[in-house]
Amino acid sequence: MTQADTKEAGLFRTAGILLLLSGLSHMAQLLLYEPAPVVKVAASFGVAYTVLGVLALQRLRFLPWLVIPVCTVGFVGGTTRMLSEPLNLQFAAHQLIHIVVIACFIAVIFHRRSNRAGMR
């Protein structure tokens, strides 16, 4: 495994673990809060994040292009929810995870492009 492969693997692993943690935490909201529609939507995102986390640990090539928009929608939805409710540490942690996961996969995309450009 080259140094470039190791870097990419680390980014995928970091994003995958964070997605798994976020997914489980999103689903846990069903146990922690009243079963309002917004909680059910958050829990459904939790299922998606858990699946994406498992896929990220397998380093699927197309995954950055799928995760970035999903996490962006989650970030916007979470921000909207944070603005309408009292600040909650769990919401803030989810937002931070969204930012880190998006950054990891943007780095993967740029890393791959720079590797392709270097091969020419």
Image (cartoon, rainbow, N blue to C red):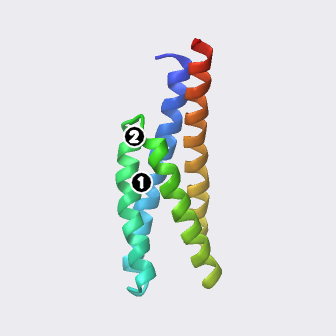
Q: Is residue 49 left or right of residue 100?
A: left
Question: Which residue is the site of mark 1?
Answer: 20
The residue sitting at the front extreme is: 120
Question: Which residue is the site of mark 2?
Answer: 57
Residue 52, image x and y in percent? 39, 50
Within 10 angstroms of label 1, few (less than 14), some, or many (20 or more) residues?
Answer: many
Residue at 59% across, 29% down: 111
Name the amino acid type tagged 2. Leu
Along the polypeptide, which appears first: circle 1 or circle 2?
Answer: 1
Within 10 angstroms of label 2, few (less than 14), some, or many (20 or more) residues?
Answer: some
Q: How far is disc 1 from disc 2 in space, using C-alphas?
A: 10 Å
Say above or below: 37 vs 14: below
Residue 18 or residue 73, whichever sits in front: 73
Name the amino acid type tagged 1. Leu
Labels 1 & 2 near each other (Cβ < 8 A): yes
Report the quarter where the C terminus lies.
top right
Q: Is residue 46 left or right of residue 69?
A: left
Residue 118, image x and y in percent? 62, 15
